[in-house]
Image (spheres, helix red, strand yellow):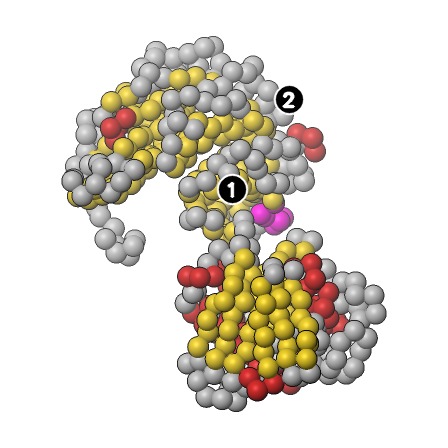
Amino acid sequence: MDCGRSWSRPVSIAPGYASSLNPDVAAVTVYSLITGSKSYVFVVWEQGSTGSREIYFVRSTDGGETWSTPQCISSDPADSKDPSIAVSVVQPFPAVPPEVTVHVVWLDNRDGVYEVYYARGENAGSSWSTCTRLSYSSGNKQKPTITASGNAVHVAWADDVTGSYEIWYMRSEDNGVSWLSRVKLTSAGAAGGIARGPSMWCSGSNVHIAWYDNRDGNLEVYYMYSVDCGSTWSGEVRLTSASGTSSLPSIAATKDIFYVVWMDARSGEFDIYFKSGFHQATLEKVYMIFRENTKVVVGSWVERPNVWPAATIDTAAAALVGYSLGAYGLSSFLAVFDSDVVDPNTLSWLDSSSNLISLGGPAVSLVSYKLDGSMGISWSTPSPDVIELTVDGHTWQVTSADEGVQDYFVVYITEDSGRFILVIEGATGWGTLAGGMFLMKMLQDTPGTIAGKTLAVVKWTASTPGAVTPSDTFTVAYTRS
């Protein structure tokens, strides 16, 4: 396989089955010390004419080379449509063959109105449970979606039981054996809108969902996430804002970075658009977070209330940050003074909408001066030739003899009023400059010790005294999630 650079020829996986519509696919590769590696591909679709459609299933156990005989899994003379499929794997130990379970939901009108039904294929889809009805309401339902990870299975659909379509959600914590009560996720109806077309993806305890609704007058794509396996959910986030219609999103994700595609008519005709994002701002995502609407902030060169004039070395650090971001393909940022974003007298924000990357500690930067206390960071001078850094009760010192040779710096990321701020500050200007170099190295190859962290204290040791170079030593002394 070559990551999609080339493709196999198309083959029919259900020859002789006419009127096959709305397919969905799921795949997984598993490994055990006993059976080795095995690649499964699972496909479902609706089969037949409107009014008497059934849900059919096939599987491949060799990565799509060969396929099983199609099997009906809905098994009812009523109409079944709009299937969605997911697969989960439970494997306590590598030596134990994994338990592969296939999960399918669809709409079924065997009860007089279309309801959401579910079936579970155990042993990688070789045997199927009886169909389970998940929804019970008088409302109209629209296309359900399903995703699974481990023993957790998540289902969502659109339902107008409240008078307007909203996105409803259910989950199972025992691999689809039993189900918790449904929950309404969206609030489009309160704003006079409707919410439809959900798409879900999960990885571990992180669950992502996208849909489209018209609460703001135009059809736009929205997003929510859960970090606790669907127990609680974030607020609703609008992802699109174009003048044309945005609808029918599809979502995929890694652990906590999500990717969305959708139909968009902003050009007058429908095109496919793509967007990626994250639900938790951590240091390794700097390249994503600050790729637009970003200002690089340094201290002023004139004396002001609260802080001293910035050192030239801080400006050099800013230049290094700008170079690093530019080398990574990011160019939509602006260099400004700290007094352009923070009022020197009141310390109130003058710019509360731009993302900020701030260079320099509280002695030279109004941004650090404003934020450090709330971030649990303090700087002090216990003696004339010692600068002391304290973070979360941990303390580090830099002496005058260390200047240009070694230093400590702090790098942290925080959210403020819907925008993000990255601060890099050293005990001296050398530390701040080293922090800029660390950012460049971080963009090129994220050190594992800061992945998933929002703050890091790093010790810099110069390979050549009086210079900051890529060959210097950077030792992560402390991190905060």
Q: Given the image, on which type of amino acid does mark 1 rest?
A: Val
Provide the major secondary structure of the magenta segment.
loop
Residue denoted by label 1: 227
Callout in the foreground (1, 2)? 1
Q: Quadrant of residue 175?
A: top left
Query: In the rendered image, which quarter is residue 424 located in?
Result: bottom right
Q: Say whether residue 317 is visible.
A: no
The question of residue 241 being in magenta is answered with: yes
Q: Are marks 1 and 2 in contact (CB under 8 Å)?
A: no
Q: Is residue 319 above or below residue 170?
A: below
Question: In the rendered structure, which segment of residues is drawn in magenta?
Answer: 238-245
| Observer-nearest of 58 and 278 | 278
Q: Residues within 10 Å of mark 1 (few under 14, many from 20)?
A: some
Q: Residue at the location (33% across, 24% down)? A: 120
Looking at the image, residue 127 lies above or below residue 345: above
Residue under circle 2? 163
Q: N-terminal of the two: label 1 or label 2?
A: 2
Q: Nearer the viewer, residue 139 or 21?
A: 139
Q: Residue at x 43, y 65 (%)?
A: 447
Reply above or below: 190 against 290. above
Q: Is residue 38 left or right of residue 238?
A: left
